[in-house]
Image: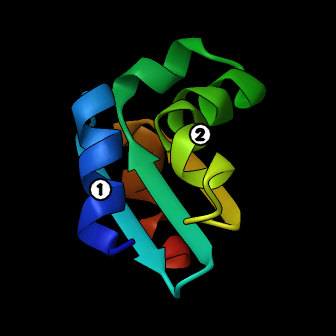
Amino acid sequence: MEVSDIEKLINDALELDELHVTFDGSQCKVIAVADMFAELSRVKRQQVVYAPLAQAISENKIHAVTIKTFTKEQWQRDKLFNL
């Protein structure tokens, strides 16, 4: 599985303002930015981004996922610490 495959899975399922994915063959790190996260709890934010990856995870194409979510405002403030 490639970074572009992971980005496509997430982008096909969610309307995000920004998406940053790194993948080393097993560990996947996702940063998702969208104002829709403002209304969601931390757990729900994680679930929303995790859902499109569930099949790839169950098929062992991805072994571990780290997800960080931000609203656009939060991202403007915190992006220097997260890229």
- Element assignment for label 2: helix
Q: Is residue 14 visible?
A: no
- In percent of width and height, residue 26 lies at 62, 79
Q: In the rendered view of the protein, which quadrant contains the C terminus? A: bottom left
Nearest the viewer among 5 and 15 is 5
Give left or right: position of 2 versus 82: left
Q: Amino acid at mark 2?
A: Ala
Q: In the rendered view of the protein, which quadrant contains the N terminus? A: bottom left
Q: Is residue 25 above or below residue 9?
A: below
Residue at mark 2: 54
- In percent of width and height, residue 27 lies at 64, 76
- At horizontal 55% and vertical 11% (from top left) the residue drawn is 39
Please tell me whether mark 2 or mark 1 is closer to you in this view. Answer: 2
Tell which residue pokes out farthest to the top in this image.
Answer: 39
Q: Earlier in the sequence, mark 2 or mark 1?
A: 1
Residue at mark 1: 7
- At horizontal 50% and vertical 60% (from top left) the residue drawn is 30
Q: Is residue 17 visible?
A: yes
- At horizontal 35% and vertical 42% (from top left) the residue drawn is 10
